[in-house]
Amino acid sequence: MPLVTSAEMFRKAYGKYAVGAFNVNNMEIIQGIVAAAREENAPLILQVSAGARKYASHIYLMKLVEAAVEDTGLPICLHLDHGEDFEICMACVDGGFTSVMIDGSKYPFEENIALTRQVVEYAHDRGVVVEAELGRLAGVEDAINVSAADSSYTDPEQAAEFVQRTGCDSLAVAIGTSHGAYKFKGEANLDFKRLETITFLLPGYPLVLHGASTVLPEFVAKCNHYGGEIKDAMGVPEEMLRRAGTMGVCKINIDTDLRLAMTASIREYLALHPADFDPRQYLRPAREAIKNMVQHKIRNVLNSSNQL
Ligand code: G3H
Ligand code: 13P
Ligand code: ZN
């Protein structure tokens, strides 16, 4: 089974459940995620940010994901997360990815359209699908920190025009989520009315929710119990994510929850075994923590078990 695009996954999922898109940076993260998807018989997108590509390098991540496909026989989609220019999208298309995101959300509407259109033409000619973004999420991605004041929700009319003029295959929308562990102050609130209007204007079209970690309190507490100092963290309640998954959101992006699960596990292990210094001893439970987190997401958030 070779790598696949997300086209068929989204067609099947639309309105019923969401496909999990998990960020990967190294072997243990990939193995943990894939083990969970295999056990749950769930569709899977593995996504690589520019930062991950810099950290591990394209070729290592590519080969690790190919190994996962060969090892499990799962139909995995390999996706570039937040491609910021044409060049990185081109490099990932040429380098074997089956899906790329061009994130022109920081540009004015017409510039975002022109850039997205350019990537769509290049990718589609080579059988690769394209995610774009309209509206701007707050929070931290790579070295970019978007303040709440600079964020903006997706305009539904513009979303419909954007999709029609660019030909992009899926669209990331801003309805109140943000990247990282500090998504809301006080009460969590997503603009479901806006999501409903976007879905109404783009019937059957797959939408993407970024910044969709729940920041589960027990993992923050565990990190802090073993020496961490994570304060005022807050994520998207699971019930809101489940609702989004029935409203045209076909792809839900999760990174922060994996980071928290892995870090909590490593902190705990090292605190309880101060004399150990074999990385396998703390990476084995960390990999298991990733697996458990992904399994939890598939069952309780994405509702994507047994959808292969
Ligand atoms: O949206 C950003 C993802 O969480 C990836 O984060 O750019 O630090 O790898 P990163
Ligand atoms: P979180 O930071 O909420 O996990 O979002 C990840 C994301 O959107 C990756 O593109
Ligand atoms: Zn994102």
Image: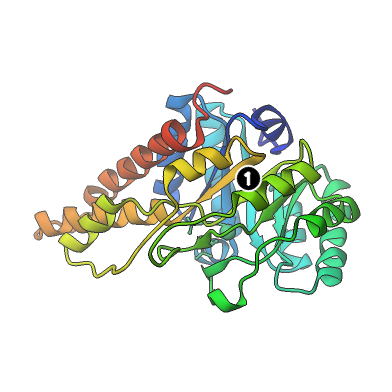
- Percent of width and height locating residue 271: 13, 59
Relative placement, left or right, of 31 versus 217 is: right
Q: Residue at x 47, y 32 (%)?
A: 37
Q: Residue at x 42, y 39 (%)?
A: 294
Of 127 and 257, the residue lying toward us? 257
- Residue pushed farthest front? 193
Q: Residue at x 49, y 56 (%)?
A: 189
Q: Residue at x 16, y 58 (%)?
A: 270
Query: Does dot 1 land on a helix, a strand or a loop?
Result: strand
Instruction: Locate the N terminus and report the quarter of the image it occupies.
Output: top right
Q: Is residue 150 visible?
A: yes
Q: Ligand 2 near label 1 (Cβ, under 8 Å)?
A: no
Of 160 and 6, the residue lying toward us? 160
Ligand 3 in which quarter: bottom right
Q: How many marks?
A: 1
Coloring scheme used: rainbow
Against 50, residue 60 (above or below) is above
Q: Is residue 31 visible?
A: no
Of 114 and 200, the residue lying toward us? 200
Of 208 and 131, the residue lying toward us? 208
Q: Which residue is mark 1?
A: 78
Against 268, residue 70 (above or below) is above
Against 37, residue 205 (above or below) is below
- Percent of width and height locating residue 181: 40, 63
Q: In terms of image quadrants, where is residue 39? A: top left
Three-letter amino acid code at the position of disc 1: Leu
- Percent of width and height locating residue 45: 58, 41
Q: In terms of image quadrants, where is residue 135? A: bottom right
